[in-house]
Image: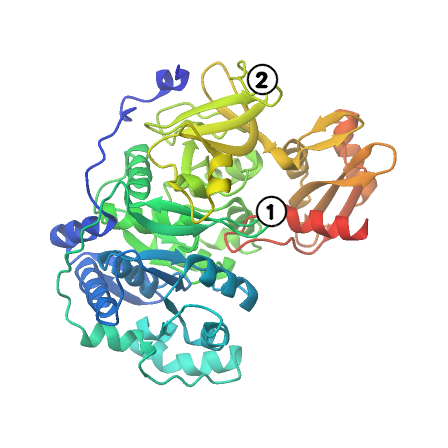
Amino acid sequence: MEKPWLAYYPPQISPHLDYPAKTLPDYLRETAAQFGQKEAIYFLGKTLTFQEVYEQSLAFANYLVNIGLNKGDRVSIMLPNCPQSVISYYGVLFAGGIVVQTNPLYTERELEYQLNDSGTTVLITLDMLYPKAVKVKGHTNVKHIIITSIKDYLPPLKKWLYPFVQKRQQPVAVQIEERDDQHLFSNIVARTSPNEINVEVDPVEDVALLQYTGGTTGFPKAAMLTHRNLIANTLMCVHWMYRCEKGNEAILGVLPFFHVYGMTTIMNLAIMRAYKMILLPKFDVEMTLKTIEKQKPTLFPGAPTMYIALLNHPNLSRYDLSSIKACISGSAPLPVEVQEKFEQITGGKLIEGYGLTEASPVTHANFLWDGERIKGSIGVPWPDTEAKIISLETGQEAKVNEIGELIIRGPQVMKGYWNQPFETESVLRDGWLYTGDVGYMDERGYFFIVDRKKDIIIASGYNIYPREVEEVLYEHPKVKEAVVVGVPHEYRGETVKAVIVLKEGEQCTEEELDEFMRSRLAAYKVPRIYEFRKELPKTAVGKILRRVLVEEENKKG
């Protein structure tokens, strides 16, 4: 197929890469050998070297084997970003297991479903989440729970203070004792020898990760991502960020590792390239600003809502963010206004990328440095990644600038969905991944997403793309966040509703917004209903949950 975008690749980016026959743990082993004494992790004042991460991961792997973990067994990691989440991840892979990334915010019902669907036998979690884990354990195949605490990897003074802080946050103390089916993480890495483990793993065929999708329709599905899928996407990231020096960057790890975007663009990238990871267990605006100023990360992968929150902090001007040189924004559309303001304040580059869980996750991005960036575009496909738009009517390849469904093929595309052959067949056809996203490609091969296939609003026969309306709302100086949904309408079939969060201290009327929107959009696209809220429902990554708002409207119906 033709790839017009390759003509716009800067000479530093090769359109085709070599993918060594390695596993993810092989990269940790190599980095520890070359950069063993270099800082690998900074976590709330505590640091670990690459050698320490390597040895503790091996110790953890040996312990898993000792308690009966076999190749291909699933291990759920239910942790925030902390040293234990990195050590657990690589430990499971060293032992030949499959990682199941599990959101710590899951309810008991969600956790029980995921543990049963994946067939998890070992669960790694925090002491404060232990009561939830114990409640669901009896309804699952989980044989072992490994418990850790944030304080396990804090410097001495913070470790001493931690129980007082925890008591304020969680009044009921959790008492945990070691027994045959319960294990303390701190004892595991302290008492187990870091012996090399030889498990035969096929990088191309063997699954490294079960990554659950959001479950926007029905129950969540687990994308099976192989070592090759994850390594390919990380190597693509390395080549896209060609000005970054091996062993000489610091990357802010605030995107959660239980989301594939954070896992690839922070954890696996840092291990492969010997970058220092500056980890934060959750996104807190003040803490993030302080961390950037003190620790001076050079790379900051994030989500638009994170950049928006930082830009709208009342004390933003007090912080020095000039260390940041490159940010790739993902998980949701990046408003142009946010991109421009963030670049102005940091002096670095903020580009929009695109991906999905089923593609490990990145498939497209704008150029960071030497190539041309197009506002509002997700950029061009990454090396070895094929992409095209197919007509929604005919299913054939669409013409240039014609709107259709984006489909993708490349080494980062998943093997399929775990135990879901029908679902797999519906999205993987002849090697192509059908994304469900609607967009178009211009004559140069730059791609534009106009919306999710299922999010298109059809009002009076017109197709209205929420993203287009949201982009205009973000241009209003008083609007902090906005999301647009279709709501039932007796005459139009559907009509456009905008849910708005205003910037702190601002006031705005529906009439003011209506006048603003009508001056910038065709009348049929202008929201007929405005609702003002203090906050919007979001995922842990900060992606606005449009479906929650749609469900709310349907219940009213």
Q: Is residue 265 above or below residue 1?
A: below
Q: Three-letter amino acid code at disc 2?
A: Glu
Residue drawn where x is 21% and y is 71% of the image:
66
Q: Residue at (28%, 49%) from the top-left corner?
A: 270
Please report whichever mark, 2 or 1, sits nearer to the chain's N-terminal start: 1
Q: In which quarter of the image is the N terminus?
A: top left
**Residue 267 position in % (x across, y down):** 32, 51
Helix, strand or loop under label 2: loop
**Label 1, on which residue?**
217
Q: Which amino acid does label 1 sit on?
A: Thr
Residues under numbered marks 2 and 1 in contact, where contact means CB atoms less than 8 Å apart: no
Q: Position of residue 109 (x, y in %)?
A: 56, 65
- Please tell me which residue lies in front, 411 or 243: 411
Q: Percent x, y for residue 198?
A: 14, 56
> Which residue shows up at 23% across the image and 70% down it?
63
- At mark 1, the secondary structure is loop
Tag in front: 2 or 1: 1
Distance from disc 2 to disc 1, alpha carbons, whole Å, reads 27 Å
Q: Please, is residue 453 above or below residue 248 in the view?
A: above
Q: Label for residue 19?
A: none
Residue at the disc numbered 2: 402
| Residue 250 against residue 159 in the figure, above or below | above
Residue 402 sits in which quadrant? top right
